[in-house]
């Protein structure tokens, strides 16, 4: 049966072009551990099967699967089925409970001209296409970056809505460092420290689903306290430095499984605090100084009335909004804080899944809200 999800046919050629371009660039730089260029028809078929599988129910739950276009020989230590399974939504739904944990992918390749599910793998080459079912009707096409070891989103499909990530967004003069990382670009980590700590904090904040705000202020600069209502109920004295200490050890221990687990726990611990009413405050050195903090307008500073809003999605247009149009109280407070503390950055998660990185734009002379939920799925 040919693919019947129209969005799959629309997006497959664009996704293929994206992968072909990145794979060629990686090989031109001497990389050998990269995936084979995907076929547009195969991508279309995998997206189609994943979509229809997402609409099924397996023991009352939405199937959550991650599919990779990969030959078994390209996967180190794969688990191969004795009999390969056809790439059908029903088969994917039945397999889902066994492979829904993070890091497990179902391998798909062509056998005698027919796409088959050959088994599972935990390790995939750089730029290998991954199609993940997030929830019913919501898919993400992504890949593992060849340098960062993290996944970078290429496209998000929700029903008939298609969002293709716009990589050109990274060249905007005010593109924040976490957005650059989410787009798969390395903003000189040797000069600025670890590339993805704020990305990991953002992902963890979004995962707990309660909404929250994280303020990142300059280390050693106490001026941010003028934008916080005193007394702070949950002030941390002395600052909590577990995450900061792990970051400082990154150069020698980043490959250690123990270090990575410790980092994950430290990130989750701080992100969990953002669920408490009020804002969590950390420094640029990743030291926790407060949580549950109430934001107020800095004395002598104007009320923020205009915010530029952008989203790194092809076709999305920048527009000017009021802070209230961004979302609820968290967004309004974050915009005011960043307007008053122009060297700070705010990460704001909504309960409905929206995620915004708020930063002052010296180029435009106003607060800039970057909508990035499509990059965090």
Image: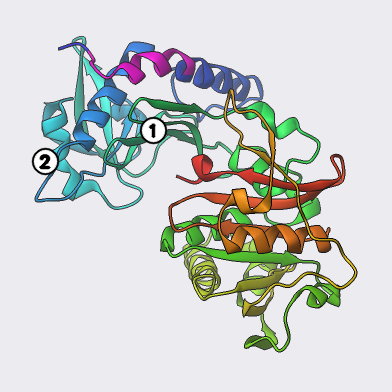
The vertical placement of 171 against 40, above or below, is below
The residue shown at (68%, 66%) is 215
Q: Quadrant of the N terminus?
A: top left
- Closer to the camera in the image, 95 or 295: 295
The vertical placement of 250 against 292, above or below, is above
Q: Are marks 1 and 2 in contact (CB under 8 Å)?
A: no
Mark 1 sits on what residue? 130
The residue shown at (62%, 21%) is 25
Q: Is 69 left, or right, of 165 in this rendering?
A: left
Type of secondary structure dominating the magenta stretch: helix
Q: Is 318 left, or right, of 225 in this rendering?
A: left
Task: Count how many numbered circles sit on residues in the image.
Answer: 2
- Closer to the camera in the image, 301 or 7: 301
Residue 279 location (% of width, % of height):
62, 71
Q: Quadrant of residue 67?
A: top left
Question: What range is drawn magenta here?
Answer: 3-14
Q: Is 355 left, or right, of 338 in this rendering?
A: left
Q: Tag 1: Cα neighbours inside 10 Å, few (<14), some, or many (≥20)? A: many
Residue 41 location (% of width, % of height):
33, 12
């Amino acid at each position: 049966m040919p693919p019947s999800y129209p969005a799959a046919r629309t997006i497959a050629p664009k996704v293929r072009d994206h992968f072909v371009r990145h794979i060629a660039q990686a090989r031109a730089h001497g990389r050998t551990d990269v995936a084979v260029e995907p076929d547009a028809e195969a991508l279309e078929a995998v997206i189609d099967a994943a979509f229809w599988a997402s609409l099924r129910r397996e023991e009352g739950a939405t199937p959550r699967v991650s599919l990779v276009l990969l030959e078994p020989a390209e996967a180190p230590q794969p688990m191969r089925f004795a009999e390969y399974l056809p790439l059908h939504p029903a088969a994917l739904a039945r397999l889902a409970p066994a492979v829904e944990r993070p890091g497990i992918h179902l391998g798909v390749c062509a056998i005698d001209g027919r796409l088959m599910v050959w088994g599972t793998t935990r390790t995939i080459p750089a730029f290998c296409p991954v199609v993940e079912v997030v929830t019913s009707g919501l898919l993400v096409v992504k890949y593992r970056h060849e340098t960062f070891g993290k996944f970078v989103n290429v496209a998000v499909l929700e029903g008939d809505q298609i969002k293709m990530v716009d990589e050109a967004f990274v060249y905007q003069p005010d593109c924040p460092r976490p957005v650059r990382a989410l787009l798969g670009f390395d903003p000189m980590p040797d000069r600025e420290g670890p590339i993805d700590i704020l990305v990991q904090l953002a992902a963890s904040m979004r995962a707990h689903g309660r909404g929250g705000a994280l303020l990142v202020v300059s280390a050693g600069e106490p001026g941010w306290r003028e934008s916080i209502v005193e007394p702070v109920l949950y002030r941390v004295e002395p600052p909590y430095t577990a995450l900061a200490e792990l970051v400082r050890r990154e150069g020698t221990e980043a490959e250690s499984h123990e270090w990575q687990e410790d980092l994950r726990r430290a990130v989750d611990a701080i992100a969990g605090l953002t669920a408490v009413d009020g804002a969590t405050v950390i420094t640029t050195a990743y030291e926790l100084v407060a949580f549950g903090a109430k934001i107020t307008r800095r004395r002598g500073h104007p009320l923020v009335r205009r915010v530029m809003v952008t989203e790194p999605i092809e076709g999305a247009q920048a527009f000017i909004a009021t802070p209230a149009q961004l979302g609820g109280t968290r967004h309004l407070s974050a915009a005011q804080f960043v307007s008053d503390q122009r060297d700070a950055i705010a990460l704001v998660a909504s309960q409905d899944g929206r995620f915004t990185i708020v930063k002052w734009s010296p180029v435009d002379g106003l607060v800039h809200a970057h909508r990035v939920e499509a990059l965090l799925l």
